Amino acid sequence: ILKNFFDFILFFLGLRKTAIISGESMFPYLKEGDIVFFKKYKKNKSILKNRQIVIFNHPLKSKNLIKRINSVNQNNVEVIGDNIEFSEDSNKFGLINNEKIIGIVTSKLIIPKLKNFLIQKNRSTSLNPK
């Protein structure tokens, strides 16, 4: 709960953004309608690590996805969904260039009243299914 509170404060300071989960590719950790906080990815400043969850531009289609990093090299990452059967990820489109990354997830919103507040304010990035 403390991490959520910290991210909520950073959100109001403009240092965190939110995204609403759509689809089941990250189930069971993330479910349809969940809200996550994320920090913007900054090339040459942000550190990418295995198992982090990232939001990125699909390399071939005009949509945003959320996946877990499976491996990292200097310029690319391999991403996979937690629910492989329902995931469009590096198994289908290969590695993604780090420049496609929008943000790194810092926490999942677990306080229901904050979720309702954020939905009412309509300040969250929408993520495409799969």
Image (spheres, rainbow, N blue to C red):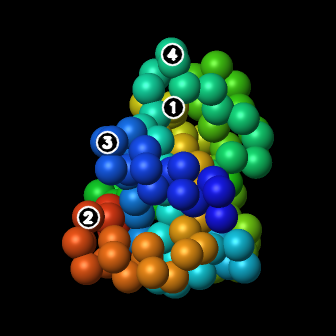
Q: Which mark is residue 44?
A: 4
Q: How crowded is mark 1: few (under 14 residues within 10 Å), some or many (20 or more)?
A: many
Give the Cα distance between marks 4 and 1.
Answer: 10 Å
Q: Residues within 10 Å of mark 4 (few under 14, many from 20)?
A: few
Q: Residues within 10 Å of mark 3 (few under 14, many from 20)?
A: few
Residue situated in front as seen by the camera: 18 or 110: 110
Amino acid under label 3?
Gly
Q: Which mark is residue 123?
A: 2
**Mark 2 secondary-structure assignment:** loop
Amino acid under label 4?
Asn
Question: Picture coordinates of residue 37 (x, y %)?
Answer: 49, 56
Which residue is at a point 68% across and 78% down the rendered structure image? Answer: 27
Foreground disc of the pair 4, 1: 4
Which residue is at a point 65% across and 64% down the rendered structure image? Answer: 1
Question: Picture coordinates of residue 92 (x, y %)?
Answer: 60, 60
Find disc 3 in the rendering and name its residue: 14
Q: Do the residues labelled 3 and 2 touch (CB within 8 Å)?
A: no
Amino acid under label 2?
Arg
